[in-house]
Amino acid sequence: MVFSSNSDEANALATKSKKKTDMTLPPPVVFTELEAHLERLSRQLDAVGLSDSKSDSAPHEKRRRVPGRFKGALVVGPEFFEPLTEDELKEFATE
């Protein structure tokens, strides 16, 4: 649907899309109410046991390392201990 610029329908749609907004300020903040609300929340958290002071009471225990835990995971064949050839030495050499 195409409207020409002189069309009554186009003008009607254009006026509908323009919203008149009034600038309203948010209500003023009352710090005493906020402070009371935060105090109430902190008391509820203390009652439930979720406060920071109680969460530090149980330290995490580190598990002891077990020697030989990965024994047999890496198998090295006897060719590993053979001397390198000249070509292999050249690949690793720096100039």
Image: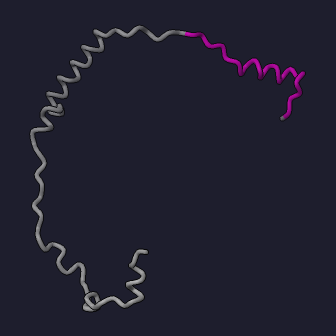
Residue at 18%, 33% in the rendered image: 50
Left or right? Give the position of 12 relative to 43.
right
Q: Residue 75, how many percent across, how many down?
A: 24, 84
Q: Residue 51, how many percent across, how many down?
A: 17, 31
- Callout count: 0
Left or right? Give the position of 23 relative to 71.
right
- The residue lying toward the viewer, choosing from 13 and 62, is 62
In the rendered view, would you say 63 is above or below 86? above
- The residue lying toward the viewer, choosing from 36 and 55, is 55
Check if residue 42 falls in the magenta segment.
no
Asked which quadrant contains residue 74, the reply is bottom left
Asked which quadrant contains residue 94, the reply is bottom left
Quadrant housing the C terminus: bottom left
In the rendered view, would you say 95 is above or below 28? below
Residue at 28%, 91% in the rendered image: 82
Quadrant housing the N terminus: top right
Residue at 11%, 68% in the rendered image: 66
Q: Range of the magenta residues?
A: 2-23
Residue at 19%, 81% in the rendered image: 72
In the rendered view, would you say 28 is above or below 62? above
Check if residue 11 falls in the magenta segment.
yes
Q: Residue 45, how many percent across, how many down?
A: 19, 28
